[in-house]
Image (cartoon, rainbow, N blue to C red):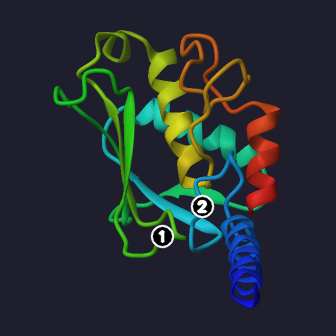
Amino acid sequence: MWNFRLKKVSFMLLLIFTLFFSTVGSADAYTNGRKPNTKNVEVQVQAYNTQWVQAYTNWDSNHKYRNIYSRSGAPNIMTAEYDSSRPGTFGRIIYNNGHSTYSTPFYTYINSYRSDVRNSANVRRSVASHEIGHVFGLADLRGSVSSIMNGDRNRERLTYPTTLDINRVNIIR
């Protein structure tokens, strides 16, 4: 009888411990768990300059805590890449550091393999805005959410972050 109670109490403690520690400190669904390690993010734009600059200028003018600006030789690269190995991918960000909490330094590109990317400045601007959202700590979203982070968004029409995106970045800081 005593052995059964000990096992029951041990099981309950293990269950409580597991539930508590599996939820404490977990990132919200809209965050990727990363953010820049500085307030000012210096970038080097190497391709599709107009769309990258329009995208980061729009982010800068609409949120409070981070600034992106271009500087020759900056460690963060924004470019285009002809990536035929990922034909369904519009863009990609690669974090170039060993810290799972920082998004900088990074290498991000717009996938020029896609004809819709090559043929539309709006699509390029939408992809650039989306990748910058990752730099600021936002995760990919799916469904009917009106967000630049929504992978199912209309890239011809939704080219800049929405109020929802800006509010979420302001929460992350």
Q: Would you say 34 lies left or right of 90 here?
A: right
User: Pointer 1: residues within 10 angstroms few (<14), some, or many (20+)?
Assistant: few
For the N terminus, the quadrant is bottom right
Residue 167 vertical placement versus 117 (above, below)? below
Residue 71 vertical placement versus 53 (above, below)? below
Counting from the top left corner in percent of width and height, residue 132 is at: 54, 45
Q: Secondary structure at mark 2?
A: loop
Location of mark 2 (residue): 33
In contact (CB < 8 Å): disc 2 and disc 1: yes
Name which of mark 2 and mark 1 comes first in the sequence: 2
- When asked about the image quadrant of residue 142, the answer is top right
Residue 40 vertical placement versus 29 (above, below)? below
Residue at left 74%, top 39%?
A: 165
Residue at left 71%, top 70%?
A: 15
Location of mark 1 (residue): 100
- When asked about the image quadrant of residue 14, the answer is bottom right
